[in-house]
């Protein structure tokens, strides 16, 4: 709601209270059609009272009748008291929610977050694993692959343990939840990647068939089973990330102190605006009730009474809401024609804008600090043995919006068969990435440009799981077992990427990469990749809790 609408709302709430003439104020349920009508005519705040009035087929909402009952002397004082109470409450709530919105901004734009799976998972568009992920829930789809010979397509889902807990408890995701357990849960994020392009073959038994059904039409041979091609989604990896150091998470107590410090000047502006508004309304209402203003308000009331009654009789709630909107706008215009009131409203607008400036201030303070995260990943790639990997990630987020990330990972086989010619350690990985935001402000960039490098040292040739799905018919290779393919040694990748920020939380990465070889092919490779990710932490409703 705008401040202009709030001024009219405060006045109406005071006056409508007496307009109920002692009748019960319990609100009936508002239908979806009535909600839609109230929304269309910008009278959502009064929808409950209007629905009550409409249901009783009598004019209950009669603000000006109450003004005349209070009298010219009492009305300005009562109105001023209501304005002060309502305005102070509204501004206090606004300041609290602004603090939550600042944390939300830091969560979504304070650092370049990890959206897709790790570099070694199928379809990832990231070379380096970022130290931050999401404070609620994120989902990403990506196509391509860095180290694998065959491109993949995958979906990655990430969930923050505390963010999901707050949401299920119907609490704001970006408000601090007191308790040691909450502090321990905040850094924990669970990641699941599903491979969407899993190909193979399925053996289907058949009913015995006579030779007449075979080529040549003779003999008594039968077909016991058929191998049919199959494509289905399969689990690619599951992992956890735990933030060792991250300044200004939703649970960080340092944020509250920084936010209070950033709002000192703003609170002064809010206080001045509230006092100015009260004085202006007191003066303008005294003048309004004695001159042409009272006549104008009486005329507006008469029009509302006539149009509202006609709409009630016709059963037209949309027309009823439209009539009240016209009346409300007339009262608002009358209140705001006074220069002092207009100046008061301007002061409040400036004060609320100061909260956005405070958000930028705290966002800058959140930058210029290191980030550190540890991650564990269990991978079950197609046609390859399962592996465990541990990653340590460090990053520095500069005040300019640039971010430098580096990580180290070690990967081991989950199981090594007896007599295998390879060891438990599969490889070690090093990666570095430089990200720079482009356009607008650091908290709301148009895009992020990335240059990254990745190196993997594999101690033995790649291990392949062999089955009927990847062995040519008629060969003598066992249908179940393991073979070594490719070569051991270094695999290097460089990448350039442009991640378009379509809106807060919604990103479209477009990347191209070059590698000296892949795990199976000893030749250089160039590939393009793309994806789409959405961090649900950007949803506005998460600031005030689920609605």
Image (cartoon, rainbow, N blue to C red):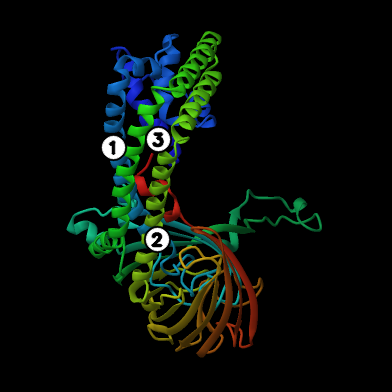
Quick one: SS at disc 3? helix
State the mark number for residue 155: none
Q: Can you identify the residue that label 2 sits on?
A: 357
Q: Is residue 133 left or right of residue 323?
A: left
Disc on the earlier residue, 3 or 1: 3
Residue wearing tag 1: 84
Nearest the viewer among 221 and 409 is 409
Residue 159's image quarter?
bottom left
Can you tell which quarter of the image residue 368 is in? Answer: bottom left
Q: Position of residue 10 (x, y in %)?
A: 36, 31
- Counting labels gives 3
Which residue is outermost to the left? 180
**Which part of the image, by quadrant, shows the N terminus?**
top left
Disc 2 versus disc 3: nearer the observer: 3
Residue at 45%, 14% in the rendered image: 54
Q: Give the Cα separation between the discs numbered 3 and 1.
A: 11 Å
Q: First in sequence: mark 2 or mark 3? A: 3
Task: Give the labeled residue for mark 3.
Answer: 7
Direction bottom: furthest residue: 489
**Is residue 124 or residue 468 the one in the foreground?**
124
Residue 202 location in percent, x, y? 58, 58
CA distance separating discs 1 and 2: 25 Å
């Amino acid at each position: 709601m705008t401040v202009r609408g709030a001024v009219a709302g405060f006045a109406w709430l005071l006056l409508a209270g007496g307009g109920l003439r002692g009748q019960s104020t319990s609100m009936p349920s508002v239908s979806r059609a009535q909600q839609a009508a109230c929304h269309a005519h910008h009278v959502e705040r009064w929808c409950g009272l209007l629905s009550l009035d409409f249901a009783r087929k009598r004019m209950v909402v009669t603000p000006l009748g109450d003004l005349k009952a209070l009298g010219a002397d009492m009305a300005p004082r009562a109105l001023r008291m209501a304005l002060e109470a309502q305005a102070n409450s509204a501004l206090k709530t606004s300041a609290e929610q602004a603090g939550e919105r600042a944390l939300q901004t830091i969560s979504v734009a304070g650092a370049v977050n990890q959206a897709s799976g790790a570099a070694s998972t199928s379809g990832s568009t990231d070379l380096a694993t970022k130290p931050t992920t999401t404070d609620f829930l994120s989902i990403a789809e990506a196509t391509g692959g860095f180290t694998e010979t065959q491109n993949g397509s995958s979906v990655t889902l990430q969930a923050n343990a505390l963010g999901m807990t707050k949401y299920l408890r119907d609490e704001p995701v970006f408000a601090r939840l007191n308790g040691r357990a909450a502090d321990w849960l905040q850094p924990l994020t669970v990641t699941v990647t599903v491979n969407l392009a899993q190909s193979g073959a399925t053996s289907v038994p058949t009913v015995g068939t006579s030779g007449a059904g075979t080529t040549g039409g003779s003999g008594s041979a039968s077909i016991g089973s058929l191998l049919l091609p199959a494509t289905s989604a399969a689990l690619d990896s599951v992992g956890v990330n735990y933030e060792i150091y991250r300044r200004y998470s939703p649970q960080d107590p340092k944020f509250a102190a920084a936010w209070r410090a950033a709002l000192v000047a703003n609170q002064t502006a809010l206080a001045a605006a509230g006092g100015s508004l009260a004085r202006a309304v007191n003066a303008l209402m005294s003048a309004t009730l004695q001159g042409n203003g009272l006549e104008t308000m009486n005329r507006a009331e008469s029009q509302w009474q006539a149009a509202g009654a006609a709409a009630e009789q016709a059963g037209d709630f949309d027309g009823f809401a439209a009539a009240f909107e016209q009346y409300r706008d007339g009262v608002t215009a009358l209140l705001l024609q006074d220069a002092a009131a207009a100046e008061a409203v301007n002061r409040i607008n400036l004060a609320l804008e100061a909260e956005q400036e405070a958000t930028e201030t705290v966002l800058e303070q959140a930058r210029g600090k290191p980030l550190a995260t540890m991650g564990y990943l269990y991978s079950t790639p197609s046609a390859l043995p399962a592996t465990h990997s541990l990653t340590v990630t460090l990053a520095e987020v500069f005040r300019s919006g640039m971010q430098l990330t580096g990580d180290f990972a070690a990967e081991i086989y989950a199981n090594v068969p007896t007599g295998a010619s390879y060891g438990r350690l599969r490889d070690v990985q090093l990666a570095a990435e430089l990200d720079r935001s482009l356009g607008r402000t650091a908290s709301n960039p148009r895009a992020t440009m990335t240059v990254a490098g990745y190196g993997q040292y594999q101690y033995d040739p790649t291990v392949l799981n062999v089955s009927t799905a990847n062995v040519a018919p008629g060969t003598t290779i066992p249908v179940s077992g393991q073979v070594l393919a490719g070569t051991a040694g270094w695999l290097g990748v460089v990448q350039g990427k442009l991640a378009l920020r379509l809106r807060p939380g919604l990103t479209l990465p477009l990347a191209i990469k070059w590698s000296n070889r892949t795990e199976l092919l000893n030749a250089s490779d160039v590939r393009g990749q793309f994806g789409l990710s959405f961090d649900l932490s950007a949803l506005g409703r998460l600031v005030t809790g689920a609605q």
